[in-house]
Image: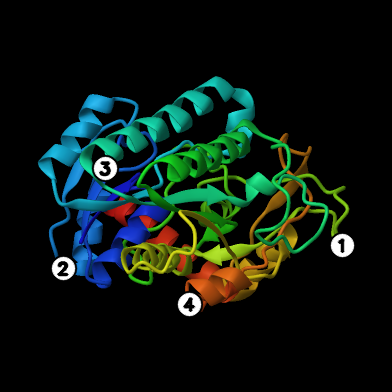
């Protein structure tokens, strides 16, 4: 089977492409390269010892998207990652987030229907739970008012997919994941943000290697044990494997509903200061940091109850926090070595 991976040269998309190829799927990558690099497709090919088709296209251009399906008529499913994804940035440029994330999804659903591709795995987020009143959150937890435009685009996207699945032949699964970190064990692909990182782990590794003067820790007065926000961090490879499980679930007809939702997390929360400490302990490298004011859109704490995914997808996390920080550090050091060799 051939799977289209939108946002395929991005952080999670690239790792998922690797796991799909390892599982025997054919893969086509589409990305507009707004926050990733074309050479990532070559790295995926190196890991899997194959040539991976890559197409540069923006999903907001329906004609270009339609051509992808025309050129690859045997696409039977889509894993949709392509989206702008930074909570803080979305607070500053909300209209761009709504335009990019929603128009691209609607174009994709229309083209899938026109071309007969019926299986969709959607990259969703725990942000749909907002500031959850009860922890850990499971799939029955209420979807609350989003605290950021980014989170709101995920909530609206899920509603669009749910309604489309109810009225067409579309079969879909939304994977609500928590905080992906780490890198592939080969250190050939990993998280490589353009500009100043919005996520914690690449900010830590870039500070540790000297790209940043210090790490900014946003807020020290949250109602948590050490005053910093708590998140459920999951290794990106574990996360990628869940997408393969989701595609397999649909293709063998195991879905119980036309639209399903699964949380993907470890079930354990770590604070920002705990992550810094874990990184320093695992690598032996000190990370200079300073407290800053809270960042708009952030919540105090959230972590997952992923037992439904454990049961229904036959999936569970295998890599721990040490694996996450060490793999992220090896990836960062590899990028620094390449830069110095140029």
Q: Which mark is nearer the camera, 3 or 1?
A: 3
Against 60, residue 231 (above or below) is: below
Q: Position of residue 113 (x, y in %)?
A: 29, 39
Residue tagged 3:
30
The reply to whether residue 147 is visible in this rendering is yes
Q: Which residue is mark 4?
A: 314
First-in-chain label (3 vs 2): 3
Residue count near mark 1 (Cα–Cα under 10 Å), binned few <14, some 14–19, many ≥20:
few
Q: CA distance from mark 3 to mark 4?
A: 28 Å
Q: Secondary structure at mark 4?
A: loop
* Mark 3 residue crowding within 10 angstroms, few (<14) / some (14–19) / many (20+): many
Percent position (x, y) of residue 197? 53, 43
Give left or right: position of 199 versus 220: left
Disc 4 versus disc 2: distance between alpha carbons?
Answer: 27 Å
- Secondary structure state at the residue bearing disc 2: loop
Q: Which residue matches tag 2?
A: 49
Colour logic: rainbow
Residues 4 and 226: in front is 4
Element under disc 3: strand
Give the alpha-carbon distance from disc 1 to disc 2, as whole Å.
47 Å
Label 1 belongs to which residue? 225
Eye-nearest disc, 4 or 1:
4
Residue 98 percent coordinates (x, y): 52, 26
Identify the image quadrant of residue 22: bottom left
Q: Quadrant of residue 253?
A: bottom left
Lower sequence index among marks 1 and 2: 2
Of circles 3 and 2, the one toward us is 3
Residue 301 location, quadrant: bottom right
């Amino acid at each position: 089977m051939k799977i289209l991976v939108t946002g395929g040269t991005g952080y999670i998309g690239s790792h998922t492409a690797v796991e799909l190829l390892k599982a025997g799927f054919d893969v086509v990558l589409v990305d507009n390269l707004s926050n990733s690099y074309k050479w990532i497709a070559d790295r995926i090919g190196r890991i899997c010892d194959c040539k991976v088709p890559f197409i540069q296209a923006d999903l907001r251009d329906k004609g270009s998207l339609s051509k992808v399906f025309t050129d690859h008529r045997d696409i039977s499913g889509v894993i949709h990652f392509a989206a702008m994804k930074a909570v803080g940035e979305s607070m500053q440029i909300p209209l761009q987030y709504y335009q990019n994330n929603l128009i691209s999804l609607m174009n994709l659903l229309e083209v899938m229907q026109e071309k007969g591709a019926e299986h969709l795995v959607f990259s969703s987020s725990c942000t749909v739970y907002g500031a959850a009143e009860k922890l850990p959150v499971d799939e029955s937890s209420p979807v609350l008012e989003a605290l950021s435009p980014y989170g709101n685009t995920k909530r609206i996207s899920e509603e669009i997919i749910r309604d489309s699945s109810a009225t067409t032949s579309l079969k879909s699964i939304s994977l609500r994941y928590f905080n992906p970190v780490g890198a592939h064990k080969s250190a050939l692909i990993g998280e490589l943000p353009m500009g100043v990182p919005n996520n914690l782990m690449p900010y830590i590794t870039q500070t540790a290697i000297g790209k940043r003067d210090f790490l900014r820790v946003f807020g020290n007065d949250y109602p948590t044990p050490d005053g910093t926000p708590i998140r459920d961090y999951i290794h990106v490879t574990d996360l990628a494997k869940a997408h393969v499980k989701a595609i397999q679930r649909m293709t063998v007809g195991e879905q119980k509903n036309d639209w399903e939702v699964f949380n993907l997390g470890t079930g354990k929360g770590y604070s920002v200061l705990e992550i810094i400490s874990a990184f320093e302990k695992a690598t032996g490298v000190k990370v200079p940091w300073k407290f800053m004011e809270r960042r708009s859109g952030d919540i105090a704490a959230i972590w997952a109850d992923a037992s439904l995914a454990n049961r229904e997808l036959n999936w569970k996390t295998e890599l721990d926090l040490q694996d996450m920080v060490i793999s992220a550090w090896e990836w960062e050091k590899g990028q620094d070595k390449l830069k110095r060799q140029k």
